[in-house]
Amino acid sequence: MYHKRISKFPEDFLFAAATSAFQVEGGIDCGGRGVAVHDLQPKKPGITDFSVASDHYHHYKEDIALMKELGLKAYRLSISWVRIMPDGESVNPEGVAFYDRLLQEVVDNGMEPIVTIYHFEYPQALVEKYGGWLDRKAIDDFERFATVLFENYGDRVKHWLTINEQDHLLKISGRLGFPEALTGQDYLKAAEQANYHMCTATARVIKKCHELLPTAKIGPVINPMPALAGSNKPEDTIAAMEFNELSTYYITELHCRGEYSPLHWKYMEDRDILPEIREEDMQLMKENTPDFLAMNYYLNQTVAKSQKKEFGYHDKAVFINEEPGIYKIVENEHVPQTDWGWNICPEGLKIAIMDFYHRYRLPILITENGLGAYDKLENGEINDDYRIEYLQNHLTQIKDCIGMGYPVFGYCAWSFMDLVSGREGMDKRYGFVYVNRNNEELLDMKRIKKKSFYWYQNMIKERGESL
Ligand code: BGP
């Protein structure tokens, strides 16, 4: 079918960029901040920790001025739980005041703040008290934290995001504070229990948001990697469908319908990893579904049937390469990769938008998309044409989707400025703004606009007409 293309993005489309608190702020000893789980994790050799990051904590005014110059309509940021509640329970006025100033600065500069409540940064104190997400007490603490944010910033924030990339989070024990000894089947069981608590907590927080801020909108941030079938064998298409179900839909079925996906349920039953469930939680989920789906998209996967006969209990893997007997990840000659081996497939973003809208009929906000690369500062300039090409190709898919009638209402490029990558330190840069530091030295921390900064600035101005 041929679809008529739109000439420009809609006038109210939220062209935006994103960061997360622990990756950009630094200042870990400032303002009474508590200890987060990731602060205590060992770092890979040669890779910086998050203690200074891009020092946005001290440079936020200068950074927000650059956002304004870039022409952003919105800025997606996260709020550090341990700045607001250093021990996970009591409120720290200095932390509340910091985000009050920061959000006000965003608003005063004509941008809308989009706030992620929980972006990987979990209070160590709650892990020590009761094991964190392994215990249902975590649901109450998450609701208390979110309530403080709604009460203090609800006058300025219209779009709230609950938990960033829950699936990803559940696969990284170092961010959850799970005991080291938890492996194999025990790890999977713990992750299913934590998933259930997070989904219940999300429903509680959606309910609270709707009660306190009736005009605000709230949704979870998912990270789909929509699978392509490894061949035209029918069994590979089925494997791809099972991959999607077990890597993303298993969470969104709970968020959007308050039900377990039947395939996910069977998966848990077969492996004896069912969580403890209460009827009242399931009811809460059914009654408190999201207003929109927020989507981080970087890569997709290509999947084929795995012919193995036994179950596997994979361990703490970030990307699950194989579910024995169900699927395995295979190479795809049509899909190039980044320097870090992430597939580059702009069409995957279109597939994700179409699939999720078909299933849930919810508006979609793209909350992350970008290219991590080794940028070179040469004669004071960064010519990141590769990043421009990546962003351009993905934005084209979104423009097509809008033309086809899918309600995508915003796009946050990852990231506004260089920050510390989740696992790869400062070498893997994503920003429109270069930060002059590296893994070994802080240098002068100067902000330098990359070529992509000017490209995005123009793209926003012409609302993507030339895409
Ligand atoms: C997402 C996270 C971000 C960011 C991004 C890039 O999973 O939400 O916080 O880190 O991925 O990943 P990385 O930093 O590992 O390259």
Image (cartoon, rainbow, N blue to C red):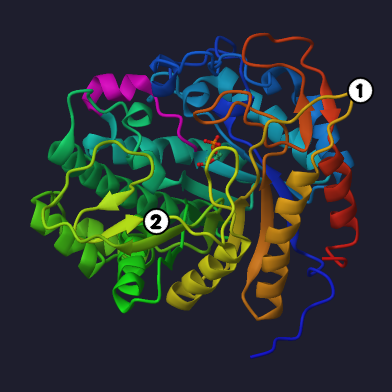
Residue 335 percent location from the top left of the image: 56, 58
Quadrant assignment for ligand 1: top right
- The residue positioned 43% from the left and 60% from the top of the image is 302
Could you tell whether 19 is left or right of 253 in the image? right
Callout 2 secondary element: loop
| Three-letter amino acid code of the residue under disc 2 | Val
Q: Tell me the crowding category of disc 2: few under 14, some 14 to 19, or many 20 or more residues within 10 angstroms, Cα based.
A: some
**Label 1 vs label 2, nearer the camera:** 2
Q: Is residue 156 magenta?
A: no
Q: Is residue 349 above or below residue 206?
A: below
Q: The N terminus is located in which quarter?
A: bottom right
Residue ID for mark 2: 330
Could you tell whether 221 is left or right of 182 in the image? right
Q: Earlier in the sequence, mark 1 or mark 2?
A: 2
Residue ID for mark 1: 379
Q: Nearer the viewer, residue 16 or 159?
A: 16
- The residue positioned 46% from the left and 29% from the top of the image is 121
Residue 232 percent location from the top left of the image: 40, 76
